């Protein structure tokens, strides 16, 4: 009887192997919890950064062609200083639109019937526009940009609905999500956007 019990007890080598197996399992579980925790923290930081500091935008539509194409992915940067020529993303009716800043507070905007834009009686140089068009314009021209607002237009003037229309009007600075900084997709067009 004692001999049978002796055979059932593990020897030192079996005990060491089982101890190593249990130690490995414990270390593996700890490493997995640590990795998952780290990934969650990094993910949360990425989401916070993308929403508060560097929003990511996807272009839908053709109002900014040829500068931006449908499905382009863009990085924006929050900035309180918007200048003529900047492309900005802003909220309008629970959507985010992308347009180019043409004038800032106090500027007087005028648009000829052919679509040529002048700011403060100075013709604008717009190399990003392929075709001039008066577009959908129901504002009284010349138009003075109100305080804390920007006047925006799409680069594809014939189809863009923008500050020329009272439906959108001038954009308040609070509604601006950010200024377009980089195009990150498609990869062959990666770089700054002008």
Image (tube, grey):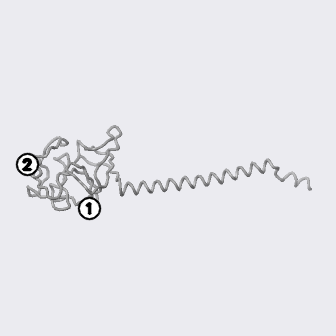
State how many labels appear: 2
Residue designated by label 2: 112
Left or right of residue 20, residue 116 in this image: left
Q: Check disc 2 and report its element: helix, strand or loop.
A: loop
**Quadrant of the snapshot with the N terminus:** bottom right
Residue that lies at the very extreme toward the top in this rendered image:
188
> Which residue corresponds to the image point at 26% horizontal and 60% vertical from the top-left?
175
Residue designated by label 1: 174
- Residue 30, image quadrant: bottom right
Q: Decide which of tag 2 and tag 1 comes sooner along the chain.
A: 2
> Which residue corresponds to the image point at 47% horizontal and 54% vertical from the top-left?
42
Q: Check disc 1 and report its element: helix, strand or loop.
A: helix
> Which residue corresponds to the image point at 31% horizontal and 55% vertical from the top-left?
78
Mark 1 neighbour density, 10 Å: few (under 14) some (14–19) many (20 or more): few
**Quadrant of the snapshot with the C terminus:** top left
Residue 7 location (% of width, % of height): 86, 51
């Amino acid at each position: 009887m004692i001999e049978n019990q002796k055979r059932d007890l593990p020897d030192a080598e079996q005990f060491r192997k089982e101890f190593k197996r249990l130690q490995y399992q414990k270390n593996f579980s700890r490493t997995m919890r640590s990795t998952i925790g780290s990934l969650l923290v990094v993910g949360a930081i990425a989401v916070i950064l993308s929403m508060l500091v560097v929003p990511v935008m996807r272009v839908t539509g053709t109002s900014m062609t040829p500068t931006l194409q449908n499905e382009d992915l863009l990085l924006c940067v929050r900035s309180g200083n918007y200048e003529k020529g900047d492309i900005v993303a802003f909220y309008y009716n629970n959507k985010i639109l992308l347009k180019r800043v043409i004038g800032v507070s106090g500027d007087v905007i005028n648009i000829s019937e052919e679509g040529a834009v002048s700011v403060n009686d100075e013709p604008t140089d717009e190399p990003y526009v392929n075709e001039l068009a008066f577009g959908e314009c129901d504002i009284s021209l010349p138009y003075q940009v109100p305080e804390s607002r920007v006047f925006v237009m799409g680069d594809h003037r014939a189809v863009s609905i923008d500050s020329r229309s009272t439906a959108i009007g001038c954009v308040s600075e609070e509604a601006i999500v950010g200024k377009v900084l980089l195009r990150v997709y498609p990869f062959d067009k990666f770089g700054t956007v002008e």
